[in-house]
Image: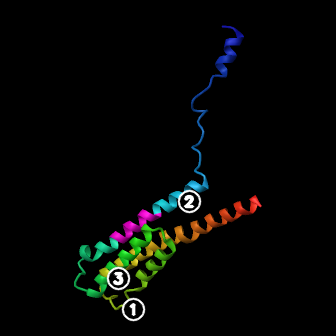
Amino acid sequence: MTANSRSVRSKKHHPASSRHPAPHKPASELVLSVYRNAKWATIGLAAALFLAPFAAGYTGAAVALWTSLALAVVIGVLGYWRQYRWATLAGAVAVIAPWPLGFSGVTLALCGCLLVGAAVVIVDGYAGFLVHSADQSRAFQKRGSKA
């Protein structure tokens, strides 16, 4: 073996040392994925609220039944049209509705409205207020840099 062949072997490329960490998604891709996922998450939550009276068996409580159905339709439509700020408001209405409408004594209806309403507020509040605000500030910065 010559000295030249030993130096080639010592500099051999090892596959484990050449691995690079996976690249992170750019912020614009994350914003788009949040919007995409928030839409379907909102529609799924609306479907859960719509089916809750039938699955939990509180169809006998008319006010609880119609409140769940109406709010589910409103939340689903707003989620479909990506009106996340309005869907956040509808989720907040779902959270507080059992008390003014008088069905807080129906435990399953109360839990359904509280859980789904809180989840809608979290998901759509994030998509509508935080992501949307960040997206608008980025657009404003781009306009300002072009001037």
What kind of residue is marked 3? Leu
Asked if the residue under mark 1 is in contact with the one under mark 2, i.e. CB atoms within 8 Å, the reply is no
Q: Residues within 10 Å of mark 3 (few under 14, many from 20)?
A: some
Of helix, strand and loop, which mostly describes the magenta segment? helix
What kind of residue is marked 1? Pro
Give whichever of discs 2 and 3 has the lower sequence position.
2
At a point 60% along the width and 39% down the height, the residue shown is: 20
Q: Is residue 68 above or below residue 5?
A: below
Quarter residue 110 falls in: bottom left
Q: Quadrant of the C terminus?
A: bottom right
Residue at the spot of label 1: 100
Give whichever of discs 2 and 1 has the lower sequence position.
2
Residue 122 visible in rendering:
yes
Quarter residue 51 falls in: bottom left
Q: Along the line of sight, which residue is nearer the eye, 93 or 14? A: 93
At a point 38% along the width and 69% down the height, the residue shown is: 45
Residue at the spot of label 3: 110
Looking at the image, residue 93 sits to the left or right of residue 106; the answer is right
Q: Along the line of sight, which residue is nearer the eye, 42 or 77? A: 77
Q: Is residue 45 above or below residue 102?
A: above
What kind of residue is marked 2? Val
Query: Residue 31, labelled with which disc?
Result: 2
Q: Residues within 10 Å of mark 2 (few under 14, many from 20)?
A: some
- Give, as a single range, the part of the protein colored magenta: 38-47
| C-alpha separation, residue under disc 2 versus residue under disc 3 | 33 Å
| C-alpha separation, residue under disc 2 versus residue under disc 1 | 37 Å
